[in-house]
Amino acid sequence: MYKFIATGFYSGLIKPAPGTWGSLSSILIISIFQYIYPSNIEFILLLFFLFTITVGTYCVRKYIQKTSKKDPSEVVVDEWAGQVLVFLFVTTTLPNLFAGFLLFRFFDILKPWPVKKFEELPGEWGIMIDDLVAGLMATFVLWGGNLLWGMYYG
């Protein structure tokens, strides 16, 4: 079960670019939640986020212990955590889902400071926290973009 969760319901096993597939699978889950629970989406996303950082971190620890890999590319629950973090603060419209996905992947792949610094933490903490920081950076950019769009076109 820990492998199933750590690999984002096995989406991290898709090659190439498992992190991108993991992020896309989280966007799919967020979209399904939006469709099923539109009036409670904020609460559902908060639960999903808490699941990814608590159960996900535990599963990542178990996975790296079992495989002896330092930062396995197939582990993508960290992408889930970072991706859903974006949508805790920005509405889940189709343009935002697209832009949030691209921004998160941009910061996750490029790893600008401080993302790279957090990646250096040991074990599951480095795996998880750098994606949360990338998610925060994507959130600020997307939130700012929405604010400016609303000021000029709203």
Image (cartoon, grey):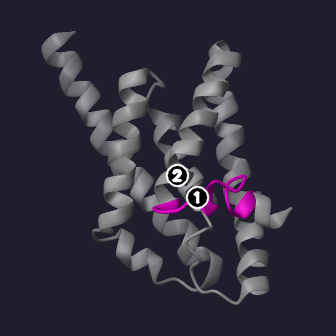
Is 28 or 83 nearer to us in this picture?
Answer: 28
**Which residue: 64% across, 86% down?**
69
Is 59 or 7 nearer to us in this picture?
Answer: 7
Q: Position of residue 73 (x, y in %)?
A: 55, 72
Check contact, mark 1 vs mark 2: CB within 8 A.
yes
Say which mark, if any, is on residue 14. 1
Disc 2 element: helix
Name above or below for residue 143 compared with residue 23. Answer: above
Crowd rating for badge 2 (residues with CA inside 10 Å; few <14, some 14–19, many 20+) = many
Q: Position of residue 98 (x, y in %)?
A: 38, 33
Disc 1 element: loop
Q: Quadrant of the C terminus?
A: top left
Say which mark, if any, is on residue 26. none
- Between label 1 and label 2, give the one nearer the viewer: 1
Q: Position of residue 28 (x, y in %)?
A: 58, 34
Would residue 37 be visible to someone looking at this image?
no
Number of numbered discs? 2
Per the rendered image, the range of residues in magenta is 5-18
Say which mark, if any, is on residue 21. 2
Q: Quadrant of the N terminus?
A: bottom right
